[in-house]
Each structure stands twice: as structure tokens, then as C-alpha cells.
Amino acid sequence: MVVHRDRGKAGSGQEFPNDNRITRSGDLFRRSAELTDIRDSVVREFFDVVPMFRRRANTGNLDPFLKFGFEFVLHAEIVPQSSAMTWRERTEDYFKGLQDRICTSLEALDGQFFREDLWSREGGGGGRTRVLENGGVFEKAGVNFSSVAGNLPQEFADKIPRGTGTAFFATGVSLVLHPASPMVPTVHANFRYLEKGDAAWFGGGMDLTPYYPHAEDAIHFHRTIKTACDSHDATLYPRFKKWCDEYFFLKHRNETRGVGGIFFDYLDGDREKDYAFVTGVGDAFLNAYVPIAEKRRSESFTERHRQYQLYRRGRYVEFNLLYDRGTIFGLETRGRTESILMSLPPLARWVYDFKPEPGSLEEQNMEFFKPKEWA
């Protein structure tokens, strides 16, 4: 049997020796084929079809339609990403691939699969929302890809300090992972490319929000990001780390959301260099976060720890609804509400005038929720 990445049957029949033991292709194909991948009779997503050449699958046991599909792909021209592709195509391709790689890694960590919803936006574009709930590690995890275009409301367009007019294009990946265990940190990441009128720029970042912080975890997270930044420009990490500390700050609480990371926006210099930087830090995300989750996932906790986690999640909700640029942009551009609010945790609590007990671990934790140098 051959199964595509969305776990649906692609063909059936007993396994034959000349099939080279292809019993499952979910780990070979990073995503399902889409019409947008084939432009002008050219397959541009070369990583989707290379495994077919490597494995040399016999299509004799597939139904005729699927056999045609494989044969078409095998005979199509395969071209790697090149300067001939537009910036919209290049960024879309990268962000789709990043979403696929992150989801594959998180599924391996959690033991469950993401649900995928494909959606379209009235006015232009759409996206792929992937959500995993009540898994082995994550109570709720969302990894979104979107690519939308159209016209911004004039009032909102006037607030964006780049470009002219109201015409826009935006594509990117946004994720928030809310673990079930209070010992595993929540994490957020976003990488995006935008155009408005005659302007184009990149933005994004990633930040870690632990409930019971460990200095070694914060150091690992920041050092991994710093290494990715330094490979492009040694001035970027300190600049974007400071920006993150300032951006993810709850002014009404006088505390940071977590232990920070990096944040950047309106990168509009050398576009090739900016693209290389954004893809570099995007590729570093899994190395920054997954080792921490693997280390903390088995630590024991009590109901007291759980209740404190829900209390701190309230801070996450407050930031996302009051300050988060991505949330505001998505709602203002009439994106899919379910996908935009995917970032919110499934459960949170607010306790009136909560004060941790003197000398408690919860009181000590508050020392982490202020800007510090970690790398």
C-alpha cells in the first residue's frame, strides 16, 4: 500500500519485491501535490519527485489515474529554484517547505499527526492550517502557512510605514506550540515576506515562553539563534534580540512574555541577503526548540504546577490580543479567523491579584521575565 502525507490511500495491493518495499510514502513526500506546484508545465518543487527517482517505484499496482499522475511527474522537467522565479514564488516555496519540515519533526516528537485545513481567502490567496491537539507532548500546536493578496483597508494601509497605495501581498509561516506539561516551554515563531505598493520586506522571529524556566534552556535557545544570525552578520543577533525584548513586553504588567529570542521587521535592504538570513533562522528553529522539549517532556509535575501554567498562559493571551502584529494584520486583512486565533492556548486562567508565595519557585521564576543576556 502507498500512503500520501495526509494519510489517505493512494493505491493498494500486496507488496511485491520489485516495489522496493515502498509500503508508506508519508516520510518520503513532504506534502501533497498541488496545482500551484506546476507552472508552465514545469515542476518546481523538485524535492517532491526526487524520491520517486531514487526508489524507482513500480506503478503497476496503482489505479490508472494515480499511475498517470506518477508518470506525468516522472517525465516533467525538474528545475531548482532560480532567479527566474518571482520573489512571491520563491518565498511561497520556502515557507511551504519549512512548514512541512517543522510538522514532520513535531509529529515525530509528539507521536500524533497534524490535522490539515486548506482554506481560501475572499479577495485572493489562502493557506494551509495544521493543528495538533491533545497529543503526547502538545496540548495544542498550530503551524500555519498562508499566501494572501488583495487590497488593504485604507485606514490600515496608512499605518504601515512602507509602500504606497493599498495593494498588498503577504506570505509566511506562523506557529505556536502549547505543551501539555508546564515543564515544557511554549514557543512561537513567524517568518514572512510582504509587499505593499512599490515596497517589499521580510519580518519574523522566534521566542521562548517557559513556565518553570531553566537558564540552560534559555542559553541553548539563544545560542542556537545567535549562531544562525552570526553566519550572516554578527550585528544582527544583538540588534534583533533587543527588539524582541522590547516587542514581547507587556506594558500593563511590566514584564516580558518569556525569555525572548529575536524579532525583526521591515528588512528591506539587499533582498538576496535578507532572504538568506530569514531562511537561515527559519531553518534553525527546530534545533533551537526540539532539544528543550525532548529534555523536559518527562519531568514530573503536580496540579499546583498545572494551575500556575494556566495562569501564565493568561499573559500569552493578553499579548496576542492586545499587541501582536500578526494577529492584528490577519484580522485587518480579513484572513481566516480560526487560523489567526490558532495561537491562543486551549485553556488559561486569570486569578485576581495573584502573588506567588515568598521564596517559592513561582516567585523565583519572575526573575526570568525581564530582559537578560543569554548568549
Image: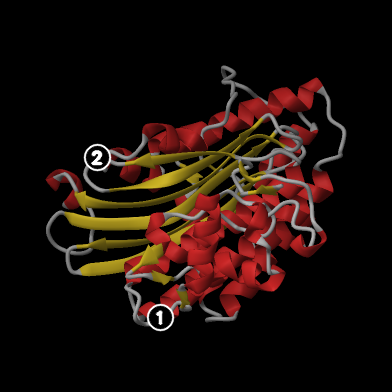
Q: Nearer the viewer, residue 132 or 16?
A: 16
Horizontally, is 210 left or right of 279 in the view? right
Q: Is residue 94 above or below residue 245?
A: below
What percent of the width, then of the height, locates residue 177? 61, 42
Q: What numbered label is drawn on residue 8?
A: none
Q: Who's the residue at 27% across and 57% down the image?
A: 169
Q: Nearer the viewer, residue 21 or 218?
A: 21
What percent of the width, then of the height, locates residue 196? 22, 61
**What residue is disc 1 on?**
272
Q: Quadrant of residue 355?
A: top right
Label 1 CA crowd tier, 10 Å (few <14, some 14–19, many 20+): few
- Whichever of callouts 1 and 2 sits on the residue coming sooner in the sequence is 2
Tell me which amino acid carries mark 2.
Glu
What percent of the width, then of the height, locates residue 164? 14, 62
* Observer able to see residue 4: yes
The residue mark sitting in front, 1 or 2, is 2
Q: What numbered label is drawn on residue 122?
A: 2
SS state under label 1: helix
Q: Is residue 365 above or below residue 16?
A: above
* Placement of the C terminus among the 4 image quadrants: bottom right
Horizontally, is 205 left or right of 161 in the view? right
